[in-house]
Amino acid sequence: MRDITQAVVLCGGLGTRLRPLTNSVPKPMVEINKKPFLWYLLLKLSSPPNNIKKFLLLTGYLKETIENYFRDGKQFGWEISYSSGPSYWDTGRRIWEANEHLDEQFVLCYSDNFAQVNLDKLYQIWKNNSSSITLLITKKKIGNVMINDHNKIILYSKERKADYQYVELGFMICSKNEIFKQFQIIENSPNISFSEILENISLDNQLSGSIINDPYHSIGDLKRLEKTRKYFQKKRILLLDRDGVINVKAPRGKYITSWDNFTFIQDTIEALKKLSLYDFKFIIVSNQAGIATGEVDITDLEEIHDNMTAFLKTKGIKILDIFVSKDHWKSQSFRRKPNPGMFFEVSQKYLLRLDETFYIGDDPRDCQAARNASCGSILIGDNIDKTKCNPDYYASRLTDLLPIILEKFKDKEINHSNC
């Protein structure tokens, strides 16, 4: 069980790449839809399954702006304290100066990246590898991390390199004792970048990594800030399975092979019609292994989807897109549910926060796929063993869950730009 309760956030930089915005506010306080970016970061860390409520903010440039907004954190249900220093301090110096405020193990975060971090998974790799630090990392053509098959980081570089295939995202679990050992070794300590500590620890084989596949978002520069603002815009988009949700399933082991044997589930149509009145849009995420087995022709599948979306359009139901895994059920493809690959493709294309929407399915594997993507899950149907997946909500019919869905989205501003 994870017993780490403190998150430490580096908030002291000048944010020069965000000027002129950062002429008057520090980078973490740049506005995202009427909230500072730092608020979204702390909310993510404090929400399930992370449940961190104690924060230490390492402030510097325009520190009063951060402290005046967040104060002691009580208004948000958090406990916030501060360690402050001049803006010219490097990241290593800020951690050094915060020594007496640090727990023995803590989560360390940069204040310009947002990712769907799961601290329990990060902690498990940290513990299993007996690492000094475990980083959240993702694939990148030019990165700063090399990793082996056992989540051990072979090399960490302060600079980006073409042959380093991962990049760290600024979320990590740290051992205070091991970090401060590095200050005794590295020349010019403590006036160093924290990346120098990471590089040194990797040379001691004490750095490990947890890979995340969901797209991350940053406010590192003006271009990325604009994309991040779109990501955080509230969207009324629901993800749907096809067979068993929109249409009646074929018998077990069989497939819907043509439009002639495609039958809509009327209760779902009624539910989608009502949701459409509240500006909901829909994306279908479906396994169709019949393509790989040769039982379904790709042309027939396209005809089914063309006719399906055309019919739903006549009912006022907008299908934004359809994502299909054509992989064989034995393939272990990352795109095939219960793996989450298609969900991440949706998030990338539509800048959709998966943790703020639902995937509606009729099979425990649908819930598993949603959970693997940090997406909410709704299970509909009869005689389903819910213990295999523990959906967020369950009902025999989708119409029974309309009040819950509407309640969950009621305070969300509607954004039409990605629809």
Image: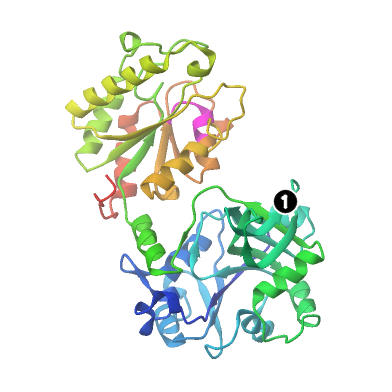
Residue drawn at (77%, 52%), measured in percent from left and top?
128
Could you tell me which quadrant the C terminus lies in? top left
Could you tell me which quadrant the N terminus lies in? bottom right
Instruction: Specify whether 343 is left or right of 189.
Output: left
- Where residue 258 appears, x then y in whole percent? 36, 11
Identify the element where label 1 is drawn.
loop
In depth, the one of 257 and 122 nearer the eye is 257
Say if the magenta span includes residue 363. Answer: yes
In which image quadrant can residue 275 be found?
top left
Q: Give the labeled residue for mark 1.
A: 151
Query: Mark 1 packing: few (<14 Cα in 10 Å), some, or many (20+)?
Result: some
- Where residue 85 appears, x then y in whole percent? 56, 89
Q: Which residues are magenta?
A: 361-367
Instruction: Specify whether 175 is left or right of 313.
Output: right
In depth, the one of 84 and 227 nearer the eye is 227
Say if the magenta span includes residue 61. Answer: no
In depth, the one of 133 and 290 nearer the eye is 290
Q: Amino acid at mark 1?
A: Asn
Residue drawn at (65%, 75%), measured in percent from left and top?
194
In which image quadrant can residue 187 be found?
bottom right
User: Can the viewer see residue 1?
Assistant: no
